[in-house]
Amino acid sequence: MVDDIARTSRAAAARPMDLLRFATAGSVDDGKSTLIGRLLYDTKSIFEDQLAAVEAVSAARGDEYTDLALLTDGLRAEREQGITIDVAYRYFATPRRKFIIADTPGHIQYTRNMVTGASTADLALILVDARKGLVEQSRRHAFLCSLLRVPHLVLCVNKMDLVDWSEEIYESIADEFTAFAAKLEAPDLTVVPISALHGDNIVTRSSRMPWYDGPALLHHLEHVHIASDRNLVDVRLPVQYVIRPQSTRYPDYRGYAGQVASGVLKPGDEIMVLPSGFTSRIASIETADGPVAEAYPPMSVTVRLTDELDISRGDLICRPHNAPKPAQDIDALICWMDESAPLQPGRKYAVKHTTRTARAVVRELQYRLDVNTLHRDETAEGLALNEIGRVRLRTTVPLLADEYRRNRTTGGFIVVDEATNRTVGAAMILDAA
C-alpha cells in the first residue's frame, strides 16, 4: 500500500499543473488587495520577512490588525492613500493549480490599468462591499470584463462581518448582480460571500455563514474548468523569431519560434504560412525541455518544417483551409489610455498585432460608448483618457487577424504613439476586411 501511495504521489508530481490567471476588479475600498493578501497568507505563499515588514507598517500606522493589503500595494503612494494605483502581479500555487493574480485598481481614474490586468485573465473576481451593494464602478468593471471576453466571473460579496453575516443582504446583492450579468452575456458566474479581513470562505468554508452551501473561494479557483475556454480549433502560431544557430553542430537547423495562440499542432500536420500562402508540413516541434508530440496554447515552441520557406517575424503559421483573411480595414473597440492627447479621426499611429507591426490611420470614430449606461454617442469627436469607442482603422500592411470574440490573442492589438513610443490604446477587433 505504501508503494501505491508513493506511485500516486510521483504521478501527481509529474503531471503538468494548470495555470489560472485571474484579475480582481471592483470599486475603491472593496477589499481587493486585502483579499489577495489573505489568499497569499492562508496558502503560505509569503516569506516571514515579508509578513514581518507588513506587521511593522501596520503597527506604525496604528492599525489593530495586520493589513494584508500591504502585500500587494507596493507603491509609496498606494500605501499612503490606501488605494491601488498600478497593476500588481502576484504568484502562488496549491497542490492542484498555479495562479497568477492581477490586482487591478478600482478607481475610475485607473480604468486603463484594470483593462491591462484583465486582458489576459481566465477569470475575474469582482468584489462588492456588502454594506454598499452594487455601485457604478462594480457594474463598470463587470461590463469591461465582458468586453474583454473574460470567460469566468466570480462575485465576491465582501465584508460580510460588517453586516452581521446577513443572508438577506447577500441574496439581494447576488440577485441584482445576476440580473445585470445576464445582459452582459457572462458565460459563467459564481457568487461567494466572504470576509477577506477575517478569512471567512476564502480557503475553507466559514462556520459563521452556515446558510451558504457553495464552495470556498480557493476551492472554486482550484476547480473551475478553463481547458475548454481556449480555442483549440483555429491553428494560429505567430512567428516571433527565426532560429538559425549556424554552427557546425547544427548546420541545417532552421526553426520558427513563437507562442501558440490557438489550435493544436502536431508533427506531420500540413500548414500554411501567411501572408505568402506557401504550404509545408511540420517536421518536429520542440520546447526548452525537448521535443513534444503536440503543441497547444499557451505553449512557447519552435516548429521545424519539411520545406525551406521564406518565413520571418510577423508571419503566421495556420491551417491551409482554416486561415484568417489578411485585412487592412479594421473595425475595433478601443480603450484609450493616453492622458496627453485624445484619439481623433485622421491621426496616425503604430499598431502592434501579435508579432506584426504596422502603421495605421484612424479613418472614423463611429461612436463613444458610455460603459455605465451602454449609451452610444455617435456625435463624439474623440476619445479621452479611459474612454471606449468603436473606430475604423486603415493599416499600411494587412493584419492576420480574427474577431476578438473568437480569438483573444489574434483579435486584439495595441496602439502606439510613434513620437513617444508610448502605448496609448488597447483594441478588440470586431470586424476585419
Image: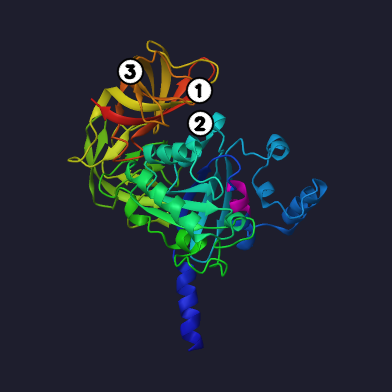
In whole angstroms, how far apart are the C-alphas of marks 3 and 2? 22 Å
Side of 250 where 32 appears, left or right: right
Closer to the camera, 73 or 242? 73
Which portion, as a residue range, is magenta? 32-37
Location of mark 1 (residue): 385
Amino acid type of disc 3? Answer: Glu
Look at label 1 and name its amino acid.
Answer: Leu
How many discs appear?
A: 3
Element assignment for label 3: loop
Label 3 vs label 2, nearer the camera: 3
Is residue 291 within the magenta segment? no
User: Residue 51, relative to residue 148: is it above or below?
Assistant: below
Pointer 2 with pointer 1, Cβ within 8 A: yes
Circle 2 residue: 112
Observer-nearest of 40 and 205: 205
Q: Position of residue 59 (x, y in %)?
A: 80, 51
Q: How many angstroms separate mark 1 from mark 3 (CA)?
A: 18 Å
Name, please, the residue furthest toward the left: 321
Q: Residue most toward the top?
A: 346
Q: Main secondary structure of the magenta part?
A: helix
Q: Which residue is mark 3?
A: 378
